Image (cartoon, grey):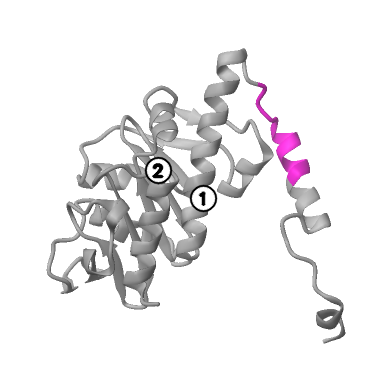
């Protein structure tokens, strides 16, 4: 499939997961010297390849009959800052957005949050599509795979599009978890030492990886 197909499919999956509603949100993937990104005004649950445009890293439209998303500057800024990032997902997911309206940081209640780098920062509020918003979100994303945008939504990144989508889905689950835990009482936050133990356990046990088959071991 082409990058346009991939972006359109990611939008439809995110919408099916409840993370995208209507035209709110945008998705992009880096394609060598270009970026494939959703166009402005696309109903993301129905996104198709012709709803995705190609721009260069200066934001100049290279191919496509529509204007790119108003958050293009945010996407391009992340790619400029993080050469290893291959995709960016921005959603208005309900639980993530709710957390971003209340907290300054999503603390680590569950060890799976370490896949995102630790506590998820909330970037200060700024008008959508503004340079100020792009700058604050990029700062919140430093050494993280996701960030929240105050009174706005979330951003997740990954080495590829599948990973960025998975990070966005994980962030939404973590935000919902925090809400439910808070309704029951004061959530217990994992300490730095407990988080370090998780990292050591992952490294020593190969947690989350598929073991090789006997044939692969022979090779």
The label nearer to you, 2 versus 1, is 2
Q: Alpha carbon of mark 2 to alpha carbon of mark 1: how far?
A: 12 Å
Within 10 Å of the Cα at label 1, are there few (<14), some (14-19), or many (20+) other Cα atoms? Answer: many
Q: Which numbered dot is residue 10?
A: none
Q: How many labels sit on residues?
A: 2
Residue 138 locus on image (x, y percent):
37, 49
Could you tell which of marks 2 and 1 lies nearer the N-terminus? 2
Q: Secondary structure at mark 2?
A: loop
Residue 60 locus on image (x, y percent):
16, 69
Is residue 24 left or right of 195 when viewed as pictured? left
Q: Secondary structure at mark 1?
A: helix
In the rendered view, would you say 177 is above or below 211? above
Can residue 63 be found in the magenta stretch?
no
For label 2, the residue is 19
For label 1, the residue is 167
Is residue 114 left or right of 160 when viewed as pictured? right
Residue 143 visible somewhere in the drawing: no
Quarter holding the N terminus is: bottom left
Residue located farthest toward the bottom when viewing the structure as drawn:
219
Q: Nearer the viewer, residue 157 or 196?
A: 157
Q: Which residues are magenta?
A: 188-198
In the rendered view, would you say 8 is above or below 183? below
Residue 76 visible somewhere in the drawing: yes
């Amino acid at each position: 499939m082409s990058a346009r197909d991939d972006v359109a499919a990611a939008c439809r999956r995110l919408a099916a997961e409840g993370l995208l509603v209507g035209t709110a949100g945008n998705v992009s993937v880096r394609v060598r010297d270009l970026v494939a990104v959703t166009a402005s005004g696309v109903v993301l649950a129905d996104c198709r390849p012709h709803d995705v445009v190609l721009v260069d890293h200066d934001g100049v439209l290279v191919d496509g009959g529509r204007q790119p998303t108003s958050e293009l500057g945010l996407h391009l800024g992340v790619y400029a800052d993080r050469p290893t990032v291959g995709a960016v997902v921005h959603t208005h997911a309900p639980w993530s957005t709710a957390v971003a309206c209340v907290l300054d940081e999503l603390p680590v209640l569950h060890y799976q949050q370490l896949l995102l780098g630790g506590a998820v920062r909330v970037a200060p509020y700024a008008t959508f599509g503004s340079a100020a918003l792009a700058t604050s979100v990029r700062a919140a994303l430093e050494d993280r795979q996701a960030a929240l945008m105050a009174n706005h939504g979330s951003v997740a990144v990954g080495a590829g599009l599948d990973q960025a989508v998975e990070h966005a889905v994980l962030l939404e689950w973590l935000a919902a978890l925090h809400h439910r835990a808070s309704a029951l009482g004061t959530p217990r936050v994992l300490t730095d030492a407990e988080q370090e133990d998780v990292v050591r356990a992952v490294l020593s046990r190969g947690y989350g990886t598929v073991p090789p088959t006997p044939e692969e071991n022979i090779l």
